[in-house]
Image (cartoon, helix red, strand yellow):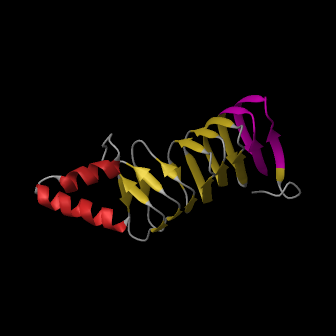
């Protein structure tokens, strides 16, 4: 995150509302509400109370609040613990956890550090990823339960008893 003494030169504070185009040469922090278009060659930070509906072009983006729109970041996108994003991300490095309702695409030479939960995941050659990946295939049920149910199908009753006995012995 930009150090206040470095290039953070604009803040949309809590309780503030901004609608329109915002082109900025330094970093921008949004703790209020923003709707429109943002372009910066530096960093954009959406604070915990920030609510943003826009398409963003920036060097890096940090999301701790709520964002609706697409992101093009030349360096990285970081989604903090309580950050929420509905939109597409195009960046070199993605840090944070992703929960997608449609699909996630990580393109050539992309990097991901975090967990993904998505119905569909596309990876191209050169992608580096570290984290837990849950690919649901569009199923609405809990994935773990679906797999356990599938595993249990077709097992004879005696096989199920053996598994239960093993678990009881562990206790």
Q: Is residue 79 magenta?
A: no
For the point 77% across and 51% down, the residue is 27
For the point 63% across and 48% down, the residue is 57
106 vs 114, left or right, is left
104 vs 52, left or right, is left
140 vs 63, left or right, is left
Q: Position of residue 136 (x, y in %)?
A: 33, 49
Total label count? 0
Q: Position of residue 104 (x, y in %)?
A: 42, 52
Magenta stretch secondary structure, dominant: strand
Which quadrant of the figure has residue 96? Answer: bottom right
Which quadrant of the figure has residue 134? Answer: bottom left
Q: Position of residue 152 (x, y in %)?
A: 19, 54
Which quadrant of the figure has residue 14? Answer: top right
Residue 12 against residue 149 in the figure, above or below: above
- Which of these two is toward me, 156 or 162? 162
- Magenta residues span 9-35
* Residue 163, visible in the rendered structure: yes
For the point 85% across and 58% down, the residue is 6
Q: Position of residue 59 (x, y in %)?
A: 66, 57
For the point 55% across and 58% down, the residue is 91
Quarter of the C terminus within the rendering: bottom left
Quarter of the N terminus within the rendering: bottom right
- Which of these two is toward me, 49 or 166? 166
37 vs 4, left or right, is left
Q: Is residue 33 magenta?
A: yes
Q: Outermost residue, right direction?
A: 5
* Residue 25, visible in the rendered structure: no
């Amino acid at each position: 995150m930009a150090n206040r003494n470095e290039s953070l030169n604009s803040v949309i504070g809590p309780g503030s509302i901004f609608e329109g185009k915002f082109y900025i040469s330094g970093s921008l922090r949004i703790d209020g509400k923003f709707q429109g278009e943002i372009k910066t060659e530096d960093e954009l930070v959406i604070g915990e109370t920030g609510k943003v509906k826009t398409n963003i072009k920036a060097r890096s983006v940090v999301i701790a609040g709520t964002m609706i729109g697409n992101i093009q970041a030349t360096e990285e996108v970081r989604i903090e613990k309580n950050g929420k994003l509905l939109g597409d991300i195009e960046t070199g490095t993605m840090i944070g956890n992703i929960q997608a309702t449609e699909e996630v695409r990580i393109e050539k030479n992309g990097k991901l550090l975090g967990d993904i939960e998505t119905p569909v995941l596309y990876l191209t050659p050169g992608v580096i990823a570290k984290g837990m990946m849950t690919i649901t295939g569009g199923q609405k049920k809990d994935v773990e339960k679906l797999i356990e149910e599938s595993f249990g199908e077709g097992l004879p009753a005696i096989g199920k008893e053996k598994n239960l006995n093993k678990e009881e012995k562990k206790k």
